[in-house]
């Protein structure tokens, strides 16, 4: 009687912390989860795509999703988010958008004016290369909508910029899968804590610098005000 040995299938490794959460979310929803995560990142910038896309590439390396499918879903998520912000900019208009920005804590009218001037100078280039800059990629669609940039041109440059950017990060996750797999299996909890700490530090630095700038501006205004006497 012959015994046929079957290859043993090992269960996927479990990962801890933020890394494990992102891995489980994307894996449970598949390529759609990648697109959903990137769409959320469009509205919640502290969750950077640079932390999401390599995870998709890593899962593709492990054969748990398609790299091309993840790329298409991520680019589709970017486009949907960009169209929403474009529509908001077109519907609200310049003056109302400027008033809203000026009332947001730690933002002021100067931030809007700088963004508007940047878009006026670079136009399609701002949309193209803005997809590669955190925070900027979330809001560059608003001035495009305000200025009523041709929709097909806006869509083309958004898809081009985000497609290249998404491909780079997913490709890195796929290419370095053999190297990062043992690291994630051993240190995913520590890496997760470090990622959360870095994001929190960036937010705190932004808040601190803005508050410091407000204090300096307030002090400067008091110095130039004439005495009541």
Image: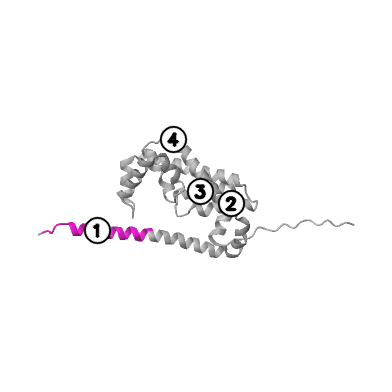
Mark 1 or mark 2, which is nearer the start of the sequence?
Answer: 2
Circle 2 residue: 57
Q: Few, some or many C-alpha atoms within 10 Å of disc 1 (few <14, some 14-19, many ≥20)?
A: few
Q: Is residue 26 among what the camera can see?
A: no
Q: As drawn, is 81 to the left or to the right of 213?
A: right
Circle 3 residue: 38
Q: Give the quarter of the image for residue 10.
A: bottom right
Cβ atoms under marks 3 and 2 closer than 8 Å = no
Q: Classify mark 3: helix, strand or loop.
A: helix
Mark 4 or mark 2, which is nearer the start of the sequence?
Answer: 2
Please tell me whether residue 220 belongs to the stretch shown in magenta.
yes
Circle 4 residue: 151
Residue bounds of the magenta highlight:
206-228
Q: Where is residue 82 in the image (x, y as percent from the top left)?
A: 45, 42
Q: Is residue 51 among what the camera can see?
A: yes
Circle 1 residue: 218
How far apart are the alpha carbons under marks 2 and 4? 31 Å
Q: As drawn, is 30 to the left or to the right of 47?
A: right
Q: Where is residue 226 in the image (x, y as percent from the top left)?
A: 14, 57
């Amino acid at each position: 009687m012959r015994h046929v040995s079957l290859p043993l299938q090992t269960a996927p490794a479990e990962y801890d912390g933020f890394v494990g959460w992102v891995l489980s979310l994307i894996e449970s929803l598949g390529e759609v989860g990648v697109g959903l995560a990137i769409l959320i990142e469009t509205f919640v910038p502290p969750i950077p795509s640079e932390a999401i896309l390599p995870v998709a590439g890593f899962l593709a390396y492990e054969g748990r999703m398609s790299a091309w499918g993840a790329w298409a879903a991520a680019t589709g998520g970017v486009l949907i988010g960009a169209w929403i912000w474009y529509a908001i900019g077109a519907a609200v208009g310049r003056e109302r958008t400027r008033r809203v920005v000026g009332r947001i804590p730690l933002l002021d009218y100067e931030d809007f004016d700088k963004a508007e001037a940047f878009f006026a100078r670079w136009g399609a280039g701002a949309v193209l290369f803005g997809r590669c800059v955190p925070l900027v990629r979330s809001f560059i669609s608003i001035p495009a909508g305000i200025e009523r940039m041709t929709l097909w041109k806006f869509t083309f440059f958004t898809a081009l910029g985000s497609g290249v950017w998404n491909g780079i990060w997913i490709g890195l996750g796929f290419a370095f899968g053999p190297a990062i797999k043992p690291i994630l299996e051993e240190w995913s909890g520590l890496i997760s804590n470090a990622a959360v700490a870095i994001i929190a530090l960036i937010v705190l630095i932004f808040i601190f610098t803005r508050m410091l700038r407000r204090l300096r501006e307030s002090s400067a205004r008091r110095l130039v005000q004439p005495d009541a006497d």
